[in-house]
Amino acid sequence: MATAIHRPIRMAEERWFFFVMSIVIFATAIAEFGSDIVVGHVWFTDFPWQVHVHAVVFTSWIVLYVVQNWLVVNGHNIMLHRRLGWLGAGIAAIMVPLGIAATVMAIARGSIAGIFPLGFFLAMDILGIFGFAALTFAAIRLRNHAGWHKRLMLCGTVLVIAPGIGRLVGPLPLGDFTPFALFAAIMLYILIGIVFDLIVLRRIHPAYWWGAATVALLQMLAGPIGFSPPVVVFAERLAS
């Protein structure tokens, strides 16, 4: 009887947790990419149309992520949640080439000067978008397994805002520790999910191990790939 009573309570707490995390991710994205506009460093007309397309598509993913979690919290719109999920799958598929193109364009426009070495930035962003795709499409495939689905979606969406986190961390006077600070900042979102699991479920869902392992693997690959001579030369040619 106690288990039967606690299970709906845990499910309700889970739903609210992921909704709150979606709001936190949305707020983080606004803080990251909107700060320059708010303080007047750049304006909308400073960017080419391709950047605006990228911004609209990636923002639509974050907004949809919030809406999807709200629908689950509401509890009466599960069918709409599932229908919108297919829209999300289409957006995710578009985000992969757009993300790669935006990274190349950012280097070519010189908009990341002084944040990270060019080759590292190129490798980090492209690996991040592939990591997002892997985790997100795994979550879609496991959509009938709610525990896996919602946690993999969280991990994948964190990688969407990783470039923005890099914009916040990059200018800090951390020197060689900057990539590790970026890794720690990304992992913090996953760690919050792990702590929630430990408090509410008394165990860590294995989806977080996959998400954390993916982020760790990307971090380990970004350095060797980003500082390899072919990638450095390619990035420098883009910037020239």
Image (cartoon, rainbow, N blue to C red):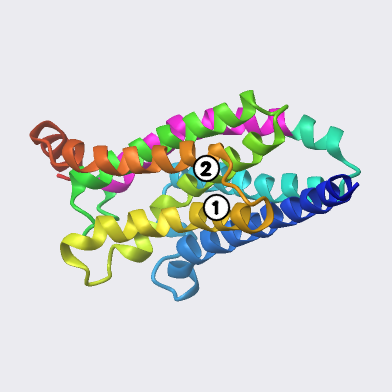
Q: Is residue 19 left or right of residue 135?
A: right
State the separation of the CA atoms marked 2 and 1: 7 Å
* Residue for point 91% across, 43% down: 76
Residue highlighted by disc 1:
194
Residue 1 coordinates in the image, percent (x, y)? 91, 46
* Residue for point 69% across, 51% down: 66
Residue 208's disc number: 2
Residue 47 visible in the shown view: no
Residue 52 coordinates in the image, percent (x, y)? 50, 48
Q: Is residue 15 above or below residue 94?
A: below
Q: Quadrant of residue 153?
A: top right
Q: Which residues are magenta?
A: 85-107
Q: Amino acid at mark 1?
A: Ile
* Residue for point 57% across, 57% down: 25
Q: Does 101 lie within the magenta span?
A: yes
Residue 50 visible in the shown view: yes
Tell me the element at label 1.
Answer: helix
The answer to whether marks 2 and 1 mark residues whose Cβ atoms lie closer than 8 Å is: yes
Q: Does 105 lie within the magenta span?
A: yes
Q: Amino acid at mark 2?
A: Tyr
Magenta-drawn stretch, dominant element (helix, strand or loop): helix
Q: Quadrant of residue 182?
A: bottom left
